[in-house]
Image (tube, rainbow, N blue to C red):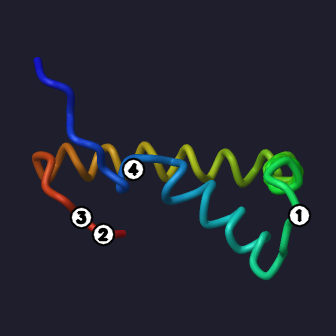
Amino acid sequence: MTHCPYSPDLSPNDFCLFPFVKNKLHGERFSTPEEAVEAFKRHVSEIPSSDWNKCFDNWFLRMQKCLKLKGEYFQK
């Protein structure tokens, strides 16, 4: 069996984590890469568990949609 192609529809990082952190970091400037990493970690640690639950619920819905569409690409 071949590896499935990458799909942003099915990656929780792409539809949940990165947009959240991107919005939080908007407009911030960092002097070092280490400062940026620390800011990323801080914002990720501030995500409430209820938001993580919603993210994974959404992930399962997206997987079901992908199966229904036989792997065809979809947007929201």
Query: Given the image, on which type of amino acid does mark 1 rest?
Result: Ser
Residue 42: image location, x then y, percent: 89, 51
Q: Which residue is mark 4?
A: 61
Image quadrant occupied by the C terminus: bottom left
Q: Which residue is mark 3?
A: 74
Real-space CA distance between mark 3 and mark 2, rounded to the nearest whole angstrom: 4 Å
Label 2 CA crowd tier, 10 Å (few <14, some 14–19, many 20+): few
Q: Which residue is mark 2?
A: 75
Query: Given the image, on which type of amino acid does mark 2 rest?
Result: Gln
Tell which tag, 3 or 4, sits nearer the viewer: 3
x 19%, y 59%: residue: 73
Q: Earlier in the sequence, mark 1 or mark 3?
A: 1
Residue 31: image location, x then y, percent: 88, 64
Label 4 CA crowd tier, 10 Å (few <14, some 14–19, many 20+): few
Real-space CA distance between mark 1 and mark 3, rounded to the nearest whole angstrom: 39 Å
Image quadrant occupied by the N terminus: top left
Q: Earlier in the sequence, mark 4 or mark 2?
A: 4
Judge from the rendering whether residue 19 lies leftward or rightward of residue 38; answer left or right.
left
Real-space CA distance between mark 1 and mark 4, rounded to the nearest whole angstrom: 40 Å
x 79%, y 82%: residue: 27
Label 3 CA crowd tier, 10 Å (few <14, some 14–19, many 20+): few
